[in-house]
Image (cartoon, helix red, strand yellow):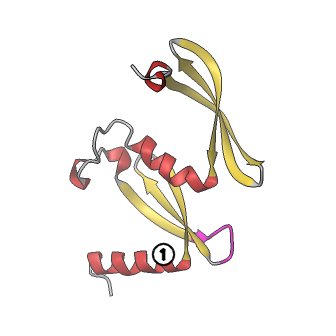
Amino acid sequence: MNQQAAEKVEVTIEAIKESVPSTVAGASSVVIETEAVVDGRVRDASIEVRDADAPAVAAALLNADAAAPPAAADLPVAVQCMAAGVVHGASEGRVRLHLQFESGQVLPIEMPYDAAAALARTLAMHTGVR
């Protein structure tokens, strides 16, 4: 058995207590304070997610139970997107897309104008909107 496998830790988040924005070494992030079960013992745990990694982390959490990416028709209701909205991004030349899921959770994704324009064209093409 390799050393990495031997050091694997089982963590289950039981409750989220608080989430606060943070800046460490100039990088923005969110620190989530939780109550977690770590290797069978209940303890407080902090999870830091860098802003740049938030979309990937959210998608991974929403699909955490899937062994492989499911087909769209097979997605559980909690991962089917109900609505989307767009607001100005945190920096010049960017927009923030908010995806809303039936569970009530919102996944914010920030992207450059060009990526947003390409997404808008593709959505219009696939939905028949002109």
Picture coordinates of residue 56 (x, y %)?
48, 51
On whether residue 91 falls in the magenta region, the answer is yes
Category of crowding for the residue at label 1, using alpha-carbon neighbours closer than 10 angstroms: few (below 14), some (14–19), many (at least 20): few
Residue drawn at the location 50% of the way across and 24% of the way down:
11
Dot 1 corresponds to which residue? 115
Name which residue type carries label 1. Answer: Ala
Residue drawn at the location 27% of the way across and 75% of the way down:
126
Residue range corresponding to the magenta coloring: 87-92
Element type at mark 1: helix
- Which quarter of the image is occupied by the C terminus? bottom left
Residue drawn at the location 27% of the way across and 43% of the way down:
68
- 127 relative to 33, above or below: below
Picture coordinates of residue 67 (x, y %)?
29, 38
- 67 relative to 104, above or below: above
Picture coordinates of residue 96 (x, y %)?
57, 67
On whether residue 111 falls in the magenta region, the answer is no
Whether residue 105 is visible here, answered yes or no, is no
- 80 relative to 5, above or below: below
